[in-house]
Image (tube, grey):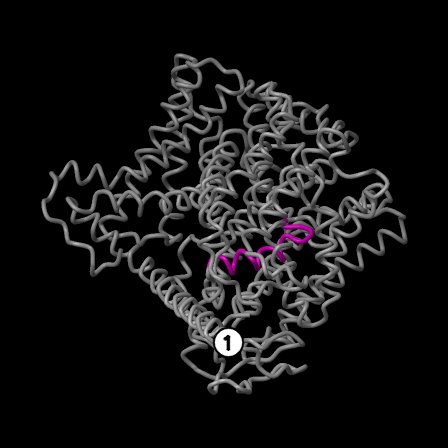
Amino acid sequence: MTMTETALPQREATLPQRMGELALPGALVGALAGCFAAILAVLGGQTPSWAAITTVTLAVPLAILGAGYSLLLATGLFRPGVFAPAGLYWFIGFPLARLVHELGAHSILAGQLGMPKDPLAFLAFQALVSLGFAIGFLWLHERVMPRWLLRVYEHNSRAWNVLAHYLQLAEQIQEQRDRKQTRSRRGKERSLRERVAERQGGHG
Amino acid sequence: MDADNPPAAREPDPELTTAEGTEDERVWSAGRLDPMPIRKLPESPPSIHLLGPTVFLVALGVGMGETYMWPRLVLVFGPEIRWLFLIGVTLQAFVMLEMARYAMATGESIFTGAARVAKPLMWFFFGTALIVYIWPGHLSAGAGALEQITGIPWMVTAIAGLLLVGLIFTLAKVIYNLLESVLSFLIGLLVVGSSIIAAMVGQFSDVTSTLTGMVQFGYLPDAATSAAWFPIIVGSIAFAGPSGMQQMWYTLHLREKGAGMGAHIPKLRGLAHAGDEEAMPARGFMFDTDDPDEMRKWKGWRRWVTFDALLLFWGITMLVTVTFTVLAQSAARQNPNVRILIENGEREAAMNAMADSFSAAGGPLLGGIFLGFIALIGLNATLGLYDSFSRGQADMAYNFIKGVNKFRMAHIYATFLWGVIIFGILVLLFGPADGPSAILDTLAFLSAFAMGAYCVVLLLVNNIMLPKPIRPNLASNLIIGFGATFYLGMLFFSLFTYGVIPD
């Protein structure tokens, strides 16, 4: 598919649906990241309720922040695949998500709200780790987002705009592929002509 | 040989000529192999995009060095020892950039580049790969970790894994696309997951000590230069990031991705789709380095691969090893016995001790997470290693064994793939998974020697076989020269001084 062949959106979905669709990839990746610990908690022999608490308190804030990232991408504030804004976004967002996780898990398991012993050192440590998280998040997001946009762009004009950025890259790849196929076809035609000529020569 | 491009006059020295007997077709003659026809260099993709064949290098490279060897050294000698890791990984990032230079400029693998210099060089790598990489020992750590989590005997998982790898690569339409998708997802999970785990179990002081340890240049305690530890330290530096021949295989993945002149080379297909495969040319292509527009595109490709090398390869390797070092420091803090086990014990005992320590500190969750990561890394390595081995051997066999190019590349690839899988299963069932003990030292020697050898090959290939405008600069040559001296020097120093081969 190329940009010229792709029709512009015909019928627009409602605003909440459009926003929800745009937010979904980031939310999915964020939730997956949070659930990763929960899946292994079950494998590691923890009770389902413990795993559920981890999921709710970590996956939910990460999913919300992930959705926020996708929406910022859709508004054009972030560009697809660019690391710096994603790194900055998670540098602030990831420590906050971890703080919610710590507070939430502690309050549910211990029955009272408890801050980390040294909140500043805690947040600074989470901010350091966030850069690694941002790489992984962006890596997975880049794989999910374009595929998802292809499914929804027909009734979502904002999705179409974001998709256009990805399609520019896809067009470059398509051009390379077309050139290669043309060359291959010429090669096959030439090889066929040579075989025909050989046979005619043999019979002649 | 491509029907479009009949052979041109062979020249021993590289030069840009017009081939005899052709319609003024310009070629680049390098070495004693067929000259490379001049073709257009495609436009590079934006360098900022997180897409690239580095995913293979990360999948292959993030292994025991990052998850076990370096955390172990940190526990024994302190975080200050990590400056050596910084040097090891940075050196590998430069090797990666230089491997990419040849592959993107020609669409050829570094093996063909070596053959352009002298065919015995290429045969050395063919033989080394054959005897070093057919042993399925690398599977045991991952499958063993999975056994700890699920209770399924490791041999069952290992054999099932081997058969699954064979089936996946046989049924795939275009092997590269499938593998890139699967590995990307697994590595994405690994990076995201390891960040979350580090965030949950680590402390600020763990990260700061790990990071500041990386700039303690020159720190080397007396014990580190002992016969017991020196070979281990040298081995750990050499195996920081991709080790053995993994960097050489990266050139094949670059070509498959269509990076640079690799865009002119057909893609390798799975056995089930071999009929769709286009004819594989016997040599690569070159672009016109006198054309400013082509040079502009070349600079774009260099930016693209530099981004891959710095952020993806260097960054992710560093991130995973920092994470595991933080985990090991947490484990040692919570259970001092783990330090003794790690110092004295063998790999599996030490890994189990680390997992037990995590379990004791944070419940079975953390122990399970640790083992889950080891299993994930084992799966990544198996997928990447079997594909790369078969791809590399098929490339060399197709181009340099007489008569083999009558077959399709997909068939040759499948022969090597299923050959190594069947051999692996037989060895798992009846033999020593790491190889017979009598030749273990030889395997370790060859694996380390190949790294020094490929640095020498890189210097020769990039400085002799490429046109002047795209040859490496002095700084790059000095760094790769340092790599050759370092890998070979340390190997022989360790061998002659201590009588032990780094492993």
Give residue B77's quadrant in the image.
top right
Magenta residue check for B247 = yes
Horizontal side of B179 relative to B29 (left or right) equals left
Residue at screen point 47% across, 54% down: B52
Magenta residue check for B438 = no
Horizontal side of B436 relative to B169 (left or right) equals right
Q: Is residue A168 visible?
A: yes
The C terminus of chain B - image quarter: top right
Point out residue B427 in the picture as x, y percentages from the top left corner. 73, 34
Point out residue B349 in the picture as x, y percentages from the top left corner. 72, 26
Above or below, A21 against A174 in this view is above
The magenta span reads: B241-257
Q: Residue furthest left?
A: A11
Above or below, B367 against A156 in this view is above
B119, B271: nearer the viewer: B271
* Residue that mark 1 sits on: B5
Q: Is residue B211 visible?
A: no
| Numbered marks: total | 1
Point out residue B327 in the picture as x, y percentages from the top left corner. 60, 32
Q: State whether the magenta stretch is mostly helix, strand or loop.
A: helix
Disc 1 residue type (three-letter): Asn
